[in-house]
Image (cartoon, rainbow, N blue to C red):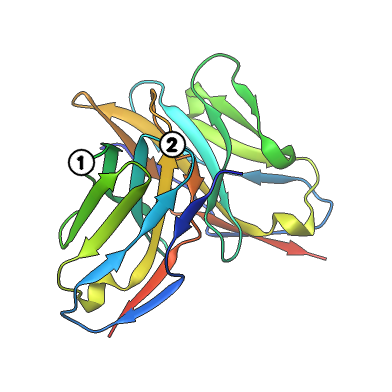
Amino acid sequence: AQSVTQPDIHITVSEGASLELRCNYSYGATPYLFWYVQSPGQGLQLLLKYFSGDTLVQGIKGFEAEFKRSQSSFNLRKPSVHWSDAAEYFCAVGFVMDSNYQLIWGAGTKLIIKP
Amino acid sequence: DVKVTQSSRYLVKRTGEKVFLECVQDMDHENMFWYRQDPGLGLRLIYFSYDVKMKEKGDIPEGYSVSREKKERFSLILESASTNQTSMYLCASSPLGAAKPPLHFGNGTRLTVT
């Protein structure tokens, strides 16, 4: 069955350090790939998406993600985090199953920023 | 700015009550979604609507119904609230199109059923 895994429930990073959040999926073809951020008390905001083409995708707020087909991964990166990046991050993967499009969500990774 | 507005931030209801969660978007989006968010489970789709009066069941529709009488408004109804429906509910919208990911989210309604 199709699935999305975010292996890290929490990640703690020092302010100014680099960040990588992992997302792996299980699907036979190339899916549609998304990263969202949820700041405390807020709804989710779409950071970036991958449909096709260049496997390195630039998003808002200085984030980027790289699709690696061989690893079935779509990891989110930022070269230098800011305290305002503390939030929960969700990976979502779009699949076509039985002619129906479905979007499956990872369980989320909570990012904690150390001053 | 696009706005998806959920009418209540917090709701406390009793078991067996009929509960209405309201969502309004101002971007003339065709697609609207209701999700339930629980810790460790990510988001689970309850219902999806791609047009007025059109709806599709999501992953967990049991115990819920929806209404979309106007394009901008999508209501989630808990016919008889139960304690296992205590959760955060998120409404979202997006324009019609391939892959149709939810683009804009409301701030959520935290529902407690006692």
Q: Is residue B16 left or right of residue B42?
A: left
Q: Is residue B86 above or below residue B50?
A: below
Name the chain under label 2: B
Q: For residue A31, which quarter of the picture?
A: top left
Q: Where is residue A108 drawn, in percent x and y?
A: 49, 54
Q: Is residue B47 above or below residue B51?
A: below
Give x and y (percent) for residue A59: 66, 33
Q: Residue at x 26, y 70 (%)?
A: B85
Left or right of residue A17, residue B54 in this image: left
Instruction: First in sequence, mark 2 or 1: give its number.
Output: 2
Task: Tell me the SS state at disc 1.
Answer: loop
Residue at 38% across, 45% down = B72
Between B30 and A75, the one nearer to me in the picture: B30
Q: Nearer the viewer, residue B40 or B74?
A: B74
Which type of secondary structure does the marked residue at label 2 adopt?
loop
Q: Callout 2, which amino acid?
A: Asp
What residue would you read off at disc 1? Answer: B53
The quarter of the picture where the N terminus of chain A appears is top left
Horizontal and vertical percent position of residue B2: 56, 43
Q: Which residue is mark 2?
A: B28
- Density class for disc 1 (Cα within 10 Å; few <14, some 14-19, many ≥20) is few
Q: Chain of mark 1?
A: B
User: Does the image show residue A14?
Assistant: no
Spatial separation of the CA atoms under disc 2 and disc 1: 15 Å
